[in-house]
Amino acid sequence: MSTETEPRVEQEPLDVFDPRLTRFDIMREGARREGIEIVHYEAQYPPGSRAERRMTRIVASFFLLTGLAATAFLVIYTWGPWEYELGSNVSKLYTPLLGLTLGIALLGIGFGILTWGKKLLPREVAIQDRHDGPSTTEDRKITGETMVYIAEELGLKRRKALGFAALAGLAPVGLVAAAPLIGGLIKDPVEDRILFKTGWDPAGNGGKPVRVTREDGTPIRPEDVSVGGQMTVFPGIPGGATNEHADSPTLLIHLRPDDAKKTLDTLKPVNQGSMWENFVAYSKICTHAGCPASLYEQQTNRLLCPCHQSQFLITDNARPIFGPATRSLPMLPIEVDEEGFFVATSDYKVAVGPAFWERP
Amino acid sequence: MKRRKIDVRAIPAKSAGALDDRFQAATPLRSLLNKVFPDHWSFLLGEIALFSFIVLLLTGTFLTFFYEPSLQTVTYDGSYTPLRGTHMSAAYASSLDLSFDVRGGLIMRQMHHWAALTFMAAIVVHMFRIFFTGAFRKPRETNWIIGSLLFWIGFLAGFTGYSLPDDALSGTGLRIASAIMLSIPVIGSWVTTSIFDGEFPGHVIMGRFYIAHVLLIPGILLALIAVHVGLVFKQKHTQWPGPGRTEHNVVGERMFPRYAIKQGGFFMIVFGVIALMGGLFQINPIWLFGPYEAFTVSAASQPDWYVMFLDGSTRLFPAWEIRFDLFGWGDGYTIPPIFWPTVVLPGVLTMLPLAYPFIEARLTKDKKAHNLLQRPRDVPARTALGAMAIMFWLVLTLSGGNDVIADKFHISLNAMTWAGRIGLLILPPIAYYVTYRICLGLQQHDREVLAHGVETGIIKRLPDGRFIEVHQPLAPVDEHGHGELDYAGWVVPKKMNRLGALGPAIKGFFYPIEKPAEAPVSPGHPPVSPIEPARREEISK
């Protein structure tokens, strides 16, 4: 059906029960009553034409494709090699095939519906009045006056005491809602100084110095780390290498003799006496954002944090020399005990990891 | 016994009547069926976000059946052989199980992740559309604000979700997040220990992130999306200027049937593309990263794309730390450098856009309501400002991957950082200037075509030997041959086939399914010399 309506003229509402009206007439009348004028309504293909039959076939084949792909999905899902097998290439295909079949099935529905809507339904242009802008001044007046009247009826102006009482009485109720949330969640970081302590604190080891261990908990002798080499070490306490002590991972470095001398010469007061012979141990937790600053450049004696590229010079107190970090990596005071294993003589002397408000 | 006859054909009408008796639905339903929506491809960008959100809800619900939000240490015993016997958190183990031991779990996980990336991308691109066309102007400022908030809440949804698998990459991200919280002056350490229930990582964070990710944040998202879409409905969609279109009407298609059908089809297409990506493109292969351990990290650890700009700002910000004494209290206080690029910058980036509609209205003294969109070229200052913002964001995002760029292109890492720092200051103003000039140029060209007509490509030699190019005016001209059309805020045709000089394309894929229409000969002035049909044949061969 093709309809070009004349420019709009205000007209009497149609009698929709008039038997001479077509269904389209009634529909258009309904739209009119919404302030909508259908100004153009035209089938894209003459009904029964070759082009229309072709479009119908296309839509139908999209839906059939969906049926096919969905069935394939079910078959693959049910009988496909879904269990992971190391080195099996067939099982690697399982997820891609599911995605392919599911994707095709959904796209088939999508394109089918779209083609149906865009090609087989008549093209139309409808114009609707926005009825935008503010409400009428009359309505604004009525609503405004009503609201002010209600407020006056409550009489807060006359009964001032009531207002104060309500405010004073209700304010704590708001806090009652907040109290359990804050009270339940809050955890004091200051009192136990948890941000300043790590797993190397002898207090956590019955007062004895904590041994320096590998990830598996075995202690380390000086000869285990070759010259110029480094090793990630953990406090030798239960769970010392787990995330329980996420602030404790430490890098034990065996410096070359000339580097060791350089390091010793530049030691800051706080790090005095923390080295043992040519060995030095720095916190592995970057002082910027807490990532492990673990990329060790043996040639330049730099430690690089891969998260934000702060670089620390290990021959100079692990001072930051590039990137966003501002503080040196803390040095762990170490020595070798009578059994010949590394121990930490005390906890780190400054807080480990990213800085915070209360950190001096 | 007399059997009561049921008139099957009358059932729909009768039940509709019964429903209306109870709910008086006919009038509002008529209004809904007939509501007119304007049509333009750029109006569908927001829909992609909405549809991705639906896919997120569907796939996410599936994932909750298998995921375990616990940091309890377990020993992995699943099908993925390389990690068997490894100690890991229950959260990571259950994420591995989802990938290897739940039938179809991996595609659900990957679809969920891809849908999240699509959701955020669609929000951003949709926001560009709103910004550059001025759709945020009165009366739609509220929806602009809600939309901006949706970005940040989507950001939180993404970050909490990304953290849940507790793999090496996401654990590192979580640790950085804790460092960011720690950096907030005065309350930072309290906030961090309260959220993590002690020091990072503690024992409860997965449970807390989980409930935030599956209930609190989606709840807020759902509520805001409902208001967002409801307001579009109530305030009616904006439209481009064009024939018959005014500030006070909506020209388009009624909601039913065509508009709704197109939306439904589009949803299935978004869903289908996400399914294809979820199946074919691997994303976040957590089994390759291993469980999170505080001491492991690898180079090239980048977050999801919508977080990268913050990663970039963190990398670029100089090592400026503020340390001071507060009247001898405590041992002195610190504002770490990470506070500025990760707390202050996002704060500014939230507040500026929220206020933008009001700032612009104030500067342009424009208090009117607008329902017609503006072409970006017609508002060069705004467009240039947008380009500047995008450039700022782009430099930050690229800097978020500067280690990868440095590695792949053999550039010094420190040079990349410095290039980012300098680029961040210099490139946005350049983008502003260039965009502004391009807008003016495009405006000028529109006016030129309106005055002189479309270039026909025909060069004509005059009797005195001069060559002139023949222009096709768009409307009757004055005595100087200049068009008298005013710019109408919409596309000016600039090619002859836009004027119908070549006739429509012939339909059919393998063979023409219709007779080619005769190409209409341009009726304008100066006349394009007519070509006889016989010669046309020849030319077309």
Image (cartoon, grey):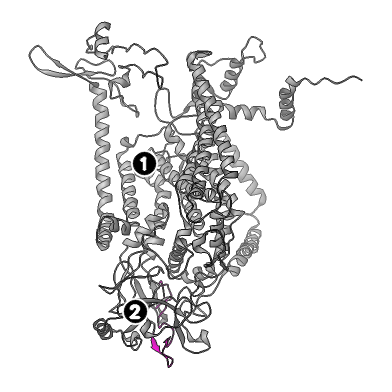
Secondary structure found at label 1: loop
Viewer-side residue, B110 vs B243: B110
Decide if residue A43 is in sight here: no
Which residue: 24% across, 34% down? B441
Q: CA distance from mark 2 to mark 1?
A: 66 Å
Relative placement, left or right, of B55 versus A270 is right
Viewer-side residue, B9 vs A34: B9
Q: Position of residue B229 (x, y in %)?
A: 53, 40
Q: Which chain is mark 1 on?
A: B
Badge 2 is on which residue? Answer: A253
Q: Position of residue A199 (x, y in %)?
A: 48, 80
Q: Any magenta on residue B270?
A: no
Q: Position of residue A302 (x, y in %)?
A: 29, 72
Viewer-side residue, B210 vs A216: A216
Q: Which residues are magenta?
A: A333-360
Q: Residue furthest bottom?
A: A338
Decide if residue A70 is in sight here: yes
Q: Residues within 10 Å of mark 2 (few under 14, many from 20)?
A: many
Give the image quarter of residue A298: bottom left
Question: What's under tag 1, amino acid-wise?
Answer: Lys
Question: What's under tag 2, amino acid-wise?
Answer: Ile
Labels 2 & 1 near each other (Cβ < 8 A): no
Number of numbered tags placed on the structure image: 2
Q: Quadrant of the N terminus of chain B?
A: top right
Viewer-side residue, A75 vs B135: A75
Relative placement, left or right, of A30 versus B253 is right
Q: Residues within 10 Å of mark 1 (few under 14, many from 20)?
A: few
